[in-house]
Amino acid sequence: MQDQNKGQFFEPKTIVAVILVGVVWYGWQTYLQKKYPNYNKPKPVVTTEVETPNNVAANATKASQEAETNSKPTSGDNKATIVAQEIHFKDQNISFTLTGNGMGLKELTLNKFVDYDKNPIKLGLSDVDSLFELKLINTPRPLFFEIKEEAPGQYVGTARVGESTVTRTITYDSEKQFFKSRIVVEKPNEDIMSGIVFVVPEKITVPQSTSWLFPSYQHQDFYVKHAGKNEVVNFSAAKENISKDFSPANIVSVSSQYFSAAIIDKSELLPETRLVSDLKTKTAKAELIYKPTLAQTQIVLEQILYAGPKSIDILAKVDPELPEVIDHGFFSFIARPLLYIMKGFYSVIGNWGLAIICLTLLVRLCVLPFAIMSARSMKAMQKIQPKLQALRERYKDDPMTMNRETMTLMKENKANPLGGCLPMLLQIPIFFALYRVIGSSIELYHSPFLGWITDLSSHDKFYVLPIIMGITMFLQTKMTPTTMDPAQAKVMAFLPLVFTVFMVQLPSGLTLYMCVSTVFGVIQQMIFLRDKNDATA
């Protein structure tokens, strides 16, 4: 049997079959090698990063060891090689992504607000930095943190810088809408002692609403509170790059017209502030910088972080000094009471347009006594105009006598040439204060009034209010008695047209104030003209 099988295996047919199988197998392998050159090469081992303390700590340690070989030793230098952890958060007011790079906030979105193009409002926009991230002054990249979520809105991160350990805790208060940040540095080394930096970035945007008189109505600015002083730097209207330093500083913010991102220092170590903007890249950035001066085994830094609307009520709950990021200008001592009065009217009426009307009427009533005095003075000046002209002719060669007789005549008739200017002078600071209040109140943002006015923070799209204001202002000019010469009177006649053009692109809330105020002035002038009492009475 064995001899028989052995003879059958070496038969020609069997040998030919084996050779054919070998040729086919070799040909197939050659074909695969040409079509797929890397087919038989060893596959790279793909590892998935698991967010366990041991694993991430090992990565952070490896990063710090590699960083020590570079000229600027910090774990942040390995940002490109280590994938940062990310934790997402969202509630009814805010949503953001916490990243391990500096424990900064990315894509911070205010869920209750949209811009004029109906896009969600985002703060701290940057292609390079994240909002409130932590880095060292000598390192362009942020520190690399191992982060973990202890509870929704409560996060702890750890970073290694050589032999130093940086622990950062961030807690979000959903009720008051702010963050608490606490940093503890154990065994700070030379790199940490050189400076610890917190970043507030933003992109420069182009204003959508401008006016000849108020070109920077929509604005972006830095705010710094340093050494008891307030400093506001408008970077959206700047014609050149900004680079400013302040020391010491306890509040720094980057704000737009209605929204702000701010850091309030609560540490024993006083920080510095650096403000920079770049017109070429359309970026701006505020930095809060801590520079320890004494050798310590531990450094503790604490801050309050805020990113949200510039609501005076919300800001006051976060910190008593934070409402100062709302820039009410030179007349802030008038603007703040007016804002609270307007909010009081709204709490009763429930409509911000009606609240503005009530505030306007209240202001006009407050200056009414001065307007009455002005009207009587103007009537008296008109009455004695013939006598004044006679005095000028009689004493044209004796100016001293002419002035003396003129003053005597005015005193006898209770006429004051400056009386007509008093109500206007009183209303100028009130107008500018109201301009700041209405132009920066988040309460008016996208708030409707009635009919075609669907947004008091945007201009009247049909220009009805500016036209009404211009017409009523023209009527008021014609009705007001004047002692000006004809040339001056012609110039004054063009003022209503000029003001109408000024108000075309301004918010309808401001135009509503001007319109109601002018209508009140016309009615007031009609009543004065009907007064038959003698002006000297």
Image (tube, rainbow, N blue to C red):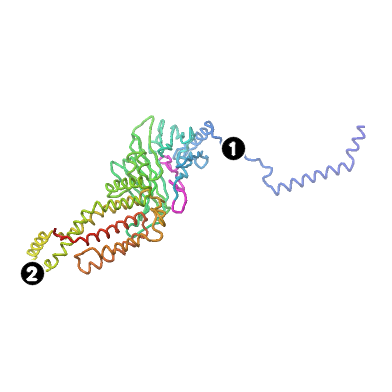
Which element carries disc 2, helix, strand or loop?
helix
Sequence-earlier tag: 1 or 2 = 1
Q: Amino acid at mark 1?
A: Thr
**CA separation in Å, label 1 and label 2:** 106 Å
Query: What residue sits right under mark 2 in the picture?
Result: 394
In the image, residue 371 lies at what x, y percent? 22, 56
Q: Is residue 87 left or right of residue 179?
A: right
Q: Are the residues flagged by discs 1 and 2 in contact, CB closer than 8 Å?
A: no
In-image side of 435 versus 379 (left or right): right
Q: Is residue 230 something that shows in the picture?
A: yes
Q: Residue at x 50, y 38 (%)?
A: 87
Horizontal and vertical percent position of residue 267: 35, 35
Q: In the rendered image, is residue 159 in sight?
A: no
Q: Quadrant of the C terminus?
A: bottom left
Q: Nearer the viewer, residue 357 or 289?
A: 357
Q: Is residue 194 left or right of residue 65?
A: left
The amino acid marked with disc number 2 is Arg
Residue plotted at (31% across, 50% down): 359
Residue 123 on the magenta span: yes
Q: Eyeballing the image, is 151 above or below 432?
A: above
The x, y position of residue 498, in whole percent, is: 31, 63
Residue drawn where x is 48% and y is 33% of the image: 151
Q: Which residues are drawn in magenta?
A: 115-141
The 10 Å Cα crowd at callout 1, few under 14, some 14 to 19, many 20 or more, is few
On screen, residue 177 versus residue 46, left or right, reads left
Mark 1, residue position? 47
